[in-house]
Amino acid sequence: MTTLVWFTHDLRLSDNPALHAAAKLGDAILPVYLVDTTNPAGHSGASLWWLHHSLIALDQQLQTLGGKLLIHLGTTESLLTLAKQHQCEHIHFSCAHEPWLAKQQKQLQQAALEHDITCRQFAGQLLLEPSTLFNKQGTPFKVFTPFYKTAVAQLGQPTAVKMPKNYQWHPHKHSASSTLKKLKWLPQKPNWAKAFKHHWQPGEAGAHLRLASVIEQLQNYNVERDIPSSDGTSMLSPHLHFGEISPRQIWQTVSTHFPSGEAAPYLRQLFWRDFSYYLVHHFEHMIKEPFKAKFDKFPWQKPTGNTLEKWQQGQTGYPLVDAGMRQLWQTGWMHNRVRMVVASFLTKHLQLHWQHGADWFWDTLLDADLANNTAGWQWVAGCGADAAPYFRIFNPITQSEKFDKHGDYIRAYVPELAKLPAKFIHAPWLAPEAELKAAGVVIGQDYPAPMVDHKTARETALAAYASLNLG
């Protein structure tokens, strides 16, 4: 007998319940990755670069064990046709949490019954499944802290599932690398991803190397995580998104290294990830609409001229914002503290709809993730669940002075300001003319003047929020 194992956001061999269950059956395994040709919310932009390399890495892993990956182009339903072609009696897959994919998995299970094929789904992409957590009233949580307390109590100590020692593989003649070449996911002219390889190693091995390299730093996570020039964050988000490492594996490894709980602030972030998926699972409307209905009437401004483009290109005139947007373009990733600052600037200083920012992040982030991206943008904009108060408007100057005190992060990504002293690098337009001249900077020529005045923009934004009577 043969079991088709459908890989989704679980591109790993270790701690992969769907794969391990197939191995325990003793069946031959047909490993498949589906490229859904009808998917309205699939990977795009930078994340396709990562997916290409992650699938290559997965195929290479499988080949070391005697198998190989089959990349199938079609619809979810076409997996049934593929299963019948290869005489598969079972289909295994990890439980999806993106609403569109979860619906397709249910439809696949129902259709499989008519063809005498057994479909089984397995948990593993989150610490806890969204369907298992509710408040005392039996309704979904809308605030993180009570969600977190309930989840921690229910989770206990998660244990990653060990890889089986023996696999049997179903032979097929398909070549994953040949299929990927035909898909042409890698950018060519221009190759805007040329620097990515210097920062990242997609694949399961890369994920575990990354975790090993940062594990000792996590005891200082609560202090270092807000400093964008340091390696205070794990940078595991792309690996987690593609499932090259599971949250259980991270939890188990971190807990083993820090049995006294020194890394608890970091582990808490894994629950924020769970909470984002939880919200999208229970409140599907928030993918395109504000979680809070009052924000339906918010007077968002329409992009005029090149306002949106200046933000996208890191040409706002606020160095911390510009450094973040340029880091995103150059590396496919942005530091979390800076993500909040640039999002606040777009939604509150410029009063542009949060969806503009979410769309740009979706195209440019290697860790582009529907749940985290949506929840994060709505959190900053003030319209999400348990969101930042609407009146919290990040001051890009004071944020820069506090979290990039010496200007190291700014100098790394805004080199035209590199020679300015730290005292003036956070607001270069206020620097004395002599300092600007010594640094070779002419405001409006070498570096743009601020798009908007912070004080004026803040007052305008507060007036707009006040019009909604948010209270």
Image (cartoon, rainbow, N blue to C red):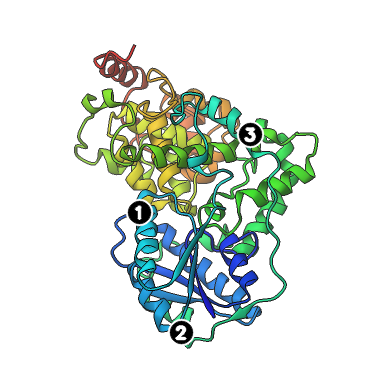
Report x, y in % for residue 441: 43, 37
Task: Identify the secondary structure beneath mark 2.
Answer: loop
Determine which of the numbered discs, if any, sits on residue 282 in the image: none
**Looking at the picture, which amino acid does disc 3 mark?**
Val
Q: Which residue was labeled with disc 2?
A: 174
**Looking at the picture, which amino acid does disc 1 mark?**
Lys
Left or right, 431 with reference to 19? left
Q: CA distance from mark 3 to mark 2?
A: 44 Å
On screen, 20 above or below 443?
Answer: below
Q: Nearer the viewer, mark 3 or mark 2?
A: 3
Task: Tell which of 318 and 441 is nearer to you.
Answer: 318
Other residues around mark 1 within 10 Å, as few (<14) / some (14–19) / many (≥20):
few
Q: Which residue was labeled with disc 3?
A: 152
Using the rendered view, name the quadrant where residue 284 is placed. top left
Using the rendered view, name the quadrant where residue 40 is placed. bottom left
On screen, 101 above or below 392?
Answer: below
Query: Could you tell me if the residues under marks 1 and 2 are in contact, i.e. CB atoms within 8 Å?
Result: no
Q: Which quarter of the rendered picture does the C terminus lie within?
A: top left
Task: Identify the secondary structure beneath mark 1.
Answer: helix
Left or right, 388 with reference to 215? left
